[in-house]
Image (cartoon, helix red, strand yellow):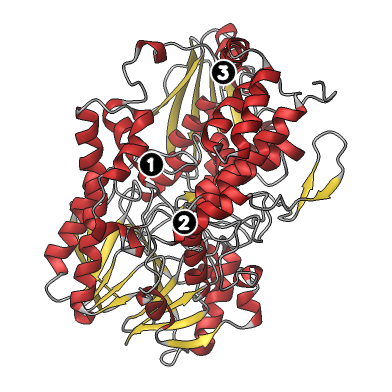
């Protein structure tokens, strides 16, 4: 499978594999007419708002640009640049009216990444070929590759480029590969490294395989569709579309792969010291911060601290907009504090999965303290406000009044990936849930009938549109979006409302400092105008599913069970015996639910299926059928030969392009 864009999230990682898409062409959902979609210009109000925003930014602070350009060894050659960076050459020196000036500055900063860089003696990075950095650390007999990009192709080309240009040891192999955490842009290129160096030993953060599955597969279809919005999967790369992905320029094209670790770290506690090919490394478990499985690393002999993705040149997500488990902002702050206290006294180099390194003990400690305090403030001030009665809808605006000047003036706490607004709402939701205790919000109508009644109460669609047009002309876009969404939800065929709502979303996108907000607004505008486009990322690749154990595979199937269909089948029981890994799974479908448990011996059941685990994966991926395996003797089934089909017939296929903004009816009725 191929991809031009992640997440599952992306590092917010996105997801596990993707389908193709055309970044510049949009296809109408009814007549299949291909049109060039570039969007409209910024309104006067948006241009004024962006200029006003720029007056509060500290453009005299260019430290991050200096760090990003420092110690360049070799610029990307044409082959390496073509993976990603070349697509963003349109980024100009001056912010256009269609891009928030702070986001534009981040877009320029991420354009500095353009080659092989020396971090310090024995540590090098390839930057600019993917959302993340490929890091190479010298060990006794070769190189340790730390985080290996999003795709096999990007990893392979980046590694070959590095080996041609390394000033030391470029004839040595990669002896080890380490994943700092469970997001795809840190493990997805693993097969590319393994193909070049088959003997490479693989290390991963604690419980990484389970967390990859939980985050990307069980809710994968919904997350994929949402990720297409957050990462602008169908938008063009130009001043009216994608300009940056906050953590880097964007995502590489190719296949996302996963080589399961030979050894997982921190399985016995928060700290683990391990010598890998002669190099002592200290690992601190940081799971529950930026990822549900994550670790940071300190190399004592080099006085070098790898912060994984706990830090970068910006504020990260406490809640990622594509959807994922809410992260713990308090733990995030505390784990950075542990890094400071454990290593702050001697560290001389801070490097990470995104952005450029920071050098110098004082500079590193200042950087880490601001990062620590920013996540701490998000957690603590959100709860302070919540304890004073501020609701989840209001808290995103309220928290921005609580941020001290020192943090506001710092570039690396700005909301390019996370934002104070949606991060505060995430903290609120983590502690108090989505409900604000207002009885009106306890059991509202479903979205469509609610929208219909709202429009009726507001005097009908014509009345709402008239008022919305007046407010739009004054640049009051936030409420116009709220009001017109009700009109379009109630009557998707109202083209006047659709077009005005699209215009509104577009202007909100142009004003957004946050890259995800920009992409979500602009994708919503695009779908209102021309319908859903090809480009939704698709999770659950064969390479990842092959690493899932049988209980997890059947957990995934349980999510796809139609409970009403399943209930009609009655009680169905099966043993699944997998000789290739010598395991037995007992499966029971009852009361519309599919459950499973691993057992040590065959239990009484309707049927027993003996099949290799690898073949189960092939069945799930549509590469073979159970009937074929039974007929050629690869699999055996005893007992009720209809039992498996009863389960299979209860499964549904998810629609990858479900509606987010209301779709226009085929007849285009008003």
Name the quadrant containing residue 299: bottom left
**On the image, numbered disc 1 is attached to which residue?**
421
From this view, report whether residue 378 is shown above or below residue 173.
Answer: above
From this view, report whether residue 239 is shown above or below residue 229.
Answer: below
Residue 296's disc is none
Position of residue 403 measured from the top left corner of the image (x, y, whole percent): 26, 49
Q: Residue at x 14, y 76 (%)?
A: 346
* Foreground tag (3 vs 1): 1
Instruction: State the CA–CA distance, disc 3 to disc 2.
Output: 36 Å
Residue 599 visible, this angle: no
Of the two numbered discs 3 and 1 on the same chain, state the one appearing first in sequence. 1
From this view, report whether residue 528 is shown above or below residue 191.
Answer: above
* Foreground tag (2 vs 1): 2
**On the image, numbered disc 3 is attached to which residue?**
447
> Could you tell me which quadrant the C terminus lies in?
top right
Task: Pick whichever, 396 or 457, lies toward us.
Answer: 457
Instruction: State the CA–CA distance, disc 2 to disc 1.
Output: 20 Å
**On the image, numbered disc 2 is attached to which residue?**
52
Would residue 405 appear left or right of 8 to someone viewing this image?
Answer: left
Q: Residue at x 71, y 23 (%)?
A: 492
Name the quadrant containing residue 94: bottom right
Task: Pick whichever, 468 or 664, lies toward us.
Answer: 468
Position of residue 147 measured from the top left corner of the image (x, y, whole percent): 42, 65
Instruction: State the CA–CA distance, disc 3 to disc 1.
Output: 23 Å
* Foreground tag (3 vs 2): 2
């Amino acid at each position: 499978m191929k991809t031009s864009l992640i997440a599952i999230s992306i590092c917010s990682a996105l997801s596990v594999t993707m389908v193709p898409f055309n970044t510049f062409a949009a296809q109408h959902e009814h007549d299949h007419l291909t049109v060039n979609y570039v969007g409209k210009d910024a309104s006067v109000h948006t241009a004024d708002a962006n200029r006003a925003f720029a007056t509060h930014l500290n453009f005299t602070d260019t430290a991050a640009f200096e760090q990003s350009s420092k110690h360049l060894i070799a610029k990307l050659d044409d082959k390496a640049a073509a993976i990603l960076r070349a697509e963003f050459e349109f980024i100009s020196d001056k912010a256009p009216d269609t891009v928030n000036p702070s986001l534009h500055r981040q877009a320029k900063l991420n354009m500095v990444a353009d080659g092989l860089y020396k971090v310090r003696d024995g540590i090098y990075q390839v930057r600019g070929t993917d959302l993340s950095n490929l890091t190479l650390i010298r060990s006794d007999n070769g190189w340790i590759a730390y985080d290996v990009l999003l795709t096999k192709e990007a990893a392979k080309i980046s590694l070959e480029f590095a080996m041609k240009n390394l000033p030391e040891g470029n004839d040595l192999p990669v002896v080890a590969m380490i994943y700092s955490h469970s997001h795809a842009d840190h493990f997805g290129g693993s097969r590319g490294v393994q193909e070049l160096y088959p003997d490479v030993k693989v290390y991963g953060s604690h419980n990484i395989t389970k967390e990859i599955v939980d985050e990307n597969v069980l809710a994968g279809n919904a997350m994929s569709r949402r990720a297409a919005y957050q990462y602008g999967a169908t938008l063009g790369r130009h001043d009216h579309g994608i300009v940056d992905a906050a953590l880097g320029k964007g995502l590489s094209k190719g296949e996302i792969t996963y080589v399961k670790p030979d050894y997982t770290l921190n399985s016995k506690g928060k700290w683990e010291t391990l010598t890998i090919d002669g190099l002592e490394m200290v690992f601190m478990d940081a799971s529950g911060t930026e990822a549900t499985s994550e670790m940071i690393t300190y190399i004592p002999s080099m006085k070098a601290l790898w912060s994984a993705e706990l830090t970068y040149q910006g504020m990260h997500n406490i809640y990622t907009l594509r959807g994922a488990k809410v992260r713990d902002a308090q733990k995030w702050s505390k784990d950075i504090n542990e890094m400071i206290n454990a290593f702050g006294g001697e560290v001389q180099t801070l490097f990470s999965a995104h952005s450029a390194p920071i050098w110098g003990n004082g500079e590193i400690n200042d950087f880490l303290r601001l990062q620590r305090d920013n996540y701490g403030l998000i957690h603590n001030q959100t709860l302070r406000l919540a304890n004073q009665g501020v609701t989840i809808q209001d808290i995103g605006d309220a928290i921005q009044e609580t941020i001290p000047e020192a943090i506001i003036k710092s570039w690396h706490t700005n909301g390019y990936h996370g934002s104070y607004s949606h991060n505060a709402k995430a903290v609120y939701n983590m502690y108090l849930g989505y409900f604000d205790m207002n009885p009106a919000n306890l059991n509202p109508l479903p979205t469509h009938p609610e929208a219909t009644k709202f429009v009726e109460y507001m005097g009908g669609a014509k009345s709402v549109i008239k008022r919305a047009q007046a407010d739009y002309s004054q640049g009051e876009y936030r409420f116009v979006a709220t009001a017109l969404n009700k009109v379009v939800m109630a009557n998707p065929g109202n083209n006047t409302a659709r077009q005005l709502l699209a215009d509104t979303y577009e202007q909100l996108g142009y004003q957004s400092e946050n890259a995800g907000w920009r992409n979500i607004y602009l994708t919503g505008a695009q779908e209102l105008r021309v319908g859903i486009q090809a480009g939704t990322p698709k999770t659950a690749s064969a390479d990842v599913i092959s690493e899932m154990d049988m209980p997890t595979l059947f957990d995934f199937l349980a999510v796809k069970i139609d409970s009403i269909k399943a209930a009609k089948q009655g009680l169905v029981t099966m043993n699944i015996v997998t000789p290739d890994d010598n395991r037995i799974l007992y499966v029971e479908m009852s009361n519309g639910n599919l459950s499973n448990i691993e057992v040590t011996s065959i239990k009484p059941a309707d049927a027993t299926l003996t099949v290799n685990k690898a073949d189960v994966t092939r069945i799930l991926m549509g590469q073979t059928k159970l009937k074929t395996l039974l007929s050629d003797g690869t699999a055996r089934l005893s007992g009720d030969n209809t039992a498996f089909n009863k389960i299979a017939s209860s499964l549904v296929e998810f629609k990858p392009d479900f509606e987010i903004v209301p779709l226009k009816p085929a007849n285009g009725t008003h």
